Image (cartoon, rainbow, N blue to C red):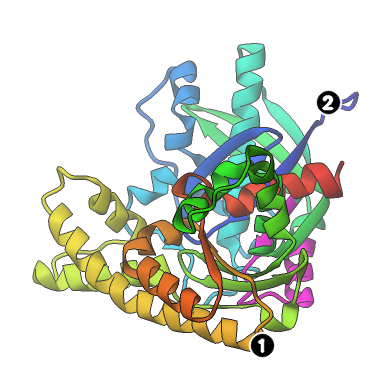
Amino acid sequence: MNRQGAITVLIAADLGNSETKMYINDQFLKQPSVIKRLFSKPENLELDVEKSILNLDHELLVNVSSQAIRRDGLFMIGERASRSADVENMNIKLGNKYKHDLPVIMLLGMVASHEVRNQYMEQGALPNFLEVKAKLSTAIPASEHTNEKAEALRRRILDHSHHVTLHVGEQQVNVQVSFDDVNVTQEGIPALYTLRAANHEILKDYVSLYDYNISEEKLDKLPKKIAEKNIVHVDIGDGTTEFNYTEKLNPVLDLSDGQRFGVGHATQEAINLLKSEVGGYLDLNRQQFMDIHRDRNNPLHKDAVNKLMEAKYTQSRLLLEAVQEKVVQTAGRVNFIMVYGGGSIQFKTELYEDLIEFAADAKLEVIWVPEEYAINMNVDGLRILNEKVLYA
């Protein structure tokens, strides 16, 4: 804490349609991007404060009062909300993330809970009040990014003091969150910073695919070398796929955009197919469907896997055509197609071989980022941007 008692933090936040991921200083946290507005506080069965703190990520309940959102209220956030019906998640067909309240509520709730837990762990008791001052870097999709929209989101967060009441069991902690600086960039661009700073493991599949036999010294320099080439980025997300084109570390904005297809659209179609399979007696959001998809013991697991596979094939054809069009637009200047994002894991079976074949015909090479790096390329890049460039 500084002399005034305020906690100062540095935040890198990927406000995704599926998950909200962030670094607060050097600590990583994530939650499903879903909220549920409540009109009365639910009954609490856990009275032990320490148990409530340990379980806080799974039971997030906050009052948010801020001029940055349209209406103050009491919200379940993240994992707790995803277990409920009638929840709110990002409308992946409409987009306009910069206008939506959900990302702001997710951001404020997660920051408040993180700092309250840290204070409890350090002091052994719940504080009554915390003041948090933050510097933040985040991004909005290329499909909707303009300087005006980025500035609109920046001002929403920067221009107001935000008040969060965190419910910990039967107790409450008041948290005031304000931002000294906010940087809003375009999704996909931070991934370049991740690539430049990475070790050669991020290119292990690429090196194996093209059977490169180079020295350890050259291998260590390869990520930075490739980052300085001309790259079509294919960042497959939940609601959008971002196609960013960079030349020698600089984004070419006229050739960078996004389109509204991805895992979320395939998931929504799979939900409709699964609903028909069970006679219409099913009401799921995307997060709940994916819970079934991951749970081998769920009676609908096999059906969910099959329906998502059908839906992903259709989306993969759209993705392949979009990548091909983007390469054509670069007029022969591109060296690499780099694929990452959470959707790159889901779509690899349907898309990988066809993309390799296309790249070979076009005299390009494909970098399909390994799963352990792909899902956090943007949030890792935002963190690097914070620490190495903006707030070094």
Rendered residue at 63%/65% (across/down)? 70
**Image quadrant where one finds the N terminus:** top right
User: In the rendered image, which residue does mark 1 sit on?
Assistant: 331
Compared across the picture, whether 255 is left or right of 377 comes to right
Please give the name of the residue rendered at 59% of the width and 62% of the height, measured from the top-left corner: 101
Q: Is disc 2 placed on a helix, strand or loop?
A: loop
Residue type at numbered disc 1: Ala
Picture quadrant where residue 306 is located? bottom left
Q: Which residue is mark 2?
A: 5
**Few, some or many C-alpha atoms within 10 Å of disc 2 (few <14, some 14-19, many ≥20)?**
few
Q: Is residue 248 above or below residue 161?
A: below
The stretch in magenta equals 137-155
User: In the image, residue 380 lies at what x, y percent?
Assistant: 64, 46
Q: Secondary structure at mark 1?
A: loop
How packed is label 1: few (under 14 Cα within 10 Å), some, or many (20 or more)? few
Report whether residue 326 is seen: yes
Residue situated in front as seen by the camera: 205 or 260: 205
Q: Is residue 152 magenta?
A: yes
Measure the alpha-carbon separation of dots 1 and 2.
56 Å
Specify the quadrant of the image occupied by residue 158. bottom right
Position of residue 209 measured from the top left corner of the image (x, y, whole percent) = 45, 57
Q: Residue 244 in magenta?
A: no
